[in-house]
Image (cartoon, grey):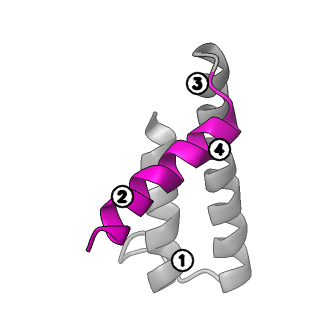
Amino acid sequence: MEEVGEAARAVRAYEIGRDHPNEPEQTKAVLRQDLMEELGDVVANVAVLADLYHISLDDIARAHQQKLSKRFDGE
């Protein structure tokens, strides 16, 4: 799932204006578009995996919410 790494790169670029120091800075609009595309790739891969293992995206979201509730409500 290299897509997660590509999304992380897009976040870094969005935050500092470019991915690598020797690259010219990009506009926020260009960086935002790249970030949306990379996040879309991640979402698409999650959907494919969920379908492969017969898990609904609703069930994934619910399980994640329950995990976070247990983690943070117990503090």
Task: Give the answer, above or below, for where 32 lies relative to 59.
Answer: below
Q: Which mark identifies residue 43?
A: 4
Instruction: Give above or below for 33 relative to 38.
Output: below
**Residue type, numbered disc 4:** Val
Q: Picture coordinates of residue 22 (x, y %)?
A: 38, 75
Image x and y of residue 65, in percent: 52, 55
Mark closer to the observer (1, 4) = 4
Which of marks 2 and 4 precedes in the sequence?
Answer: 4
Q: Earlier in the sequence, mark 4 or mark 3?
A: 4
Q: Residue at image x 35%, y 77%?
A: 21
Circle 3 — which element?
helix
Q: CA distance from mark 1 to mark 2?
A: 32 Å
Q: Give the secondary structure at mark 4.
A: helix
Query: What residue range appears in magenta?
Result: 55-75
Q: State which mark lies toward you, 1 or 2.
A: 2
Mark 1 lies on residue: 14
Q: Earlier in the sequence, mark 1 or mark 2?
A: 1
Q: Is residue 43 left or right of residue 18?
A: right
Q: According to the image, label 2 marks what residue? A: 70
Query: In this image, 75 relative to 8: left or right?
Result: left
SS at circle 1: helix
Amino acid type of the residue that numbered disc 1 sits on in the rendered structure: Tyr
View extreme (left): residue? 75
Q: Which amino acid, by three-letter code, is at mark 2? A: Lys
Say what secondary structure mark 2 lies in. helix
Q: Which residue corresponds to the image point at 54% horizontal and 83% vertical from the top-left?
A: 25
Q: Residues within 10 Å of mark 4 (few under 14, many from 20)?
A: some
Relative to the observer, which residue lies in front, 14 or 69? 69
Amino acid type indicated by mark 3: Leu
